[in-house]
Image (cartoon, rainbow, N blue to C red):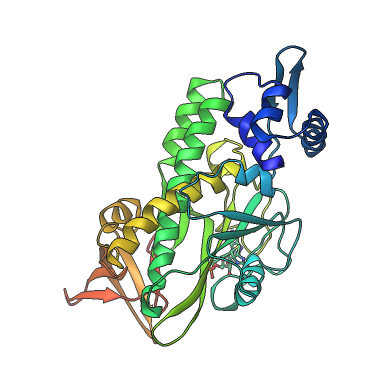
Amino acid sequence: MKTKILKILRNADGFVSGQAICESLGVSRTAVWKVINQLKEEGYEFDAVSNKGYRIVNYPDILTKSEIESQLDKNDIIKKIVFFDETDSTNNRAKKAAEEGEESGTLFITECQTGGRGRRGRNWVSPPGSGIWMTLLIRPDIRPDEASMLTIVAAMAVSSAITKVTKYDAKAILSDEKDISFADNKIEQCKIKWPNDIVLDKKKICGILTEMSAEPEHVNYVVTGIGINVNTTEFADEIKDMASSIFVQTGVRIKRSHVVAQFAHDFTEYFNRFIKTQDLSLLVDDYNKMLINAGKTVRIEERGDAYTAEAYGIDNEGRLIVKVDDTGEEKKIIAGEVSVRGLYGY
Ligand code: BTX
């Protein structure tokens, strides 16, 4: 009921009377009043005027189930939020729940991870209060060799959600035109480093870790873990040279739940395009526009060999198409097998 009341208040244009809420949900005045009090305790600030009703004037920066679910659309692939104050890793929680039969479209999210994981056993720093640490569980009808493309789909959705929300919140929060245009220009540099890091002005602000359970011909489930540094201002020694956050880069302190909700909308759009053809043919053009490596020289390291090449963009399977500097040979690089770095930072 909290989600429903929050949704009514969020979507209202002005005040909503307690009576109107009672009637639309078929609940008592006391029940509504109780929920309003709970919301106040969570940090929502209200204007309450007799004869007019309630209006939310300030939203807290929280990631609770009702805060996010009240912003989801009915067509979104994400249907359900499972929130933890703290957990080891949302990928672990999602995998465990998937094994126990949790349905497709559930998003696991936490304020803080004590054992956040990156790829190949690397650590993902996930402090409380300032980032988004979340994992989406889906059960798509695809083959195991197609699952890596979901990482590309997720990277596109994260990058576009960050860009849209930062622009929107900048207008809502900042009053100085100069600050707004600084934030707008800066966020245009939010790009994907192939295959799935999100960078902003050469600093890593997001990483994605996809894991799956599959039979030879069939995927049981895919969990896509996403870590985003949103309002982080202090970085652990091990990452401070290469990591940054949306706030540090743009000066805009965005609401994390807005990013999660926009991610839900954008992931739905990109996923629907992917599933139509079961490849990236309807996405490559958009992906390549978001790609920081496009048209740039990259250094490729594979099995002891290292060379430089010019990167063009991805193909329909998500491979990076490059032209090797020394030989002029065109190659298609598969994610996971090689390390690709820009020559000057990203
Ligand atoms: P990755 O292997 O590409 O990146 C890991 C590397 O990134 C680390 O070795 C470190 O150098 C750097 N790093 C660690 N923490 C951060 C950070 N907060 N910001 C920027 N750079 C950092 C990327 O792996 C995949 C990360 C997925 C994280 C999500 S969070 C929710 C879910 N749960 C979980 O345990 N992992 C995923």
Q: Nearer the viewer, residue 236 or 268?
A: 268
User: Which of the 4 image quarters holds residue 135?
Assistant: bottom right
**Can residue 175 be seen?**
yes
- Name the residue: 65% across, 19% down: 15
In the image: residue 25, left or right of residue 259: right
Q: Nearer the viewer, residue 344 or 114?
A: 114
Q: Nearer the viewer, residue 266 or 164?
A: 266
User: Looking at the picture, how far across and down is residue 134, in whole percent?
Assistant: 60, 59
**Can residue 295 be seen?**
no
Total numbered labels placed on residues in the image: 0
In the image: residue 290, left or right of residue 61: left
In the image: residue 135, left or right of residue 167: right
User: Looking at the picture, how far across and down is residue 329, in whole percent?
Assistant: 17, 76
User: Looking at the picture, how far across and down is residue 288, in whole percent?
Assistant: 29, 56
Quadrant assignment for ligand 1: bottom right
- Name the residue: 54% across, 42% down: 249
User: Which of the 4 image quarters holds residue 127?
Assistant: bottom right
Task: Indicate whether 39 appears above or below 271.
Answer: above
- Name the residue: 71% across, 63% down: 113
Task: Indicate whether 80 appears above or below 92.
Answer: above
Task: State the residue lying farthest toward the left.
Answer: 328
Quarter that holds the N terminus: top right
Task: State the residue lying farthest toward the top.
Answer: 51
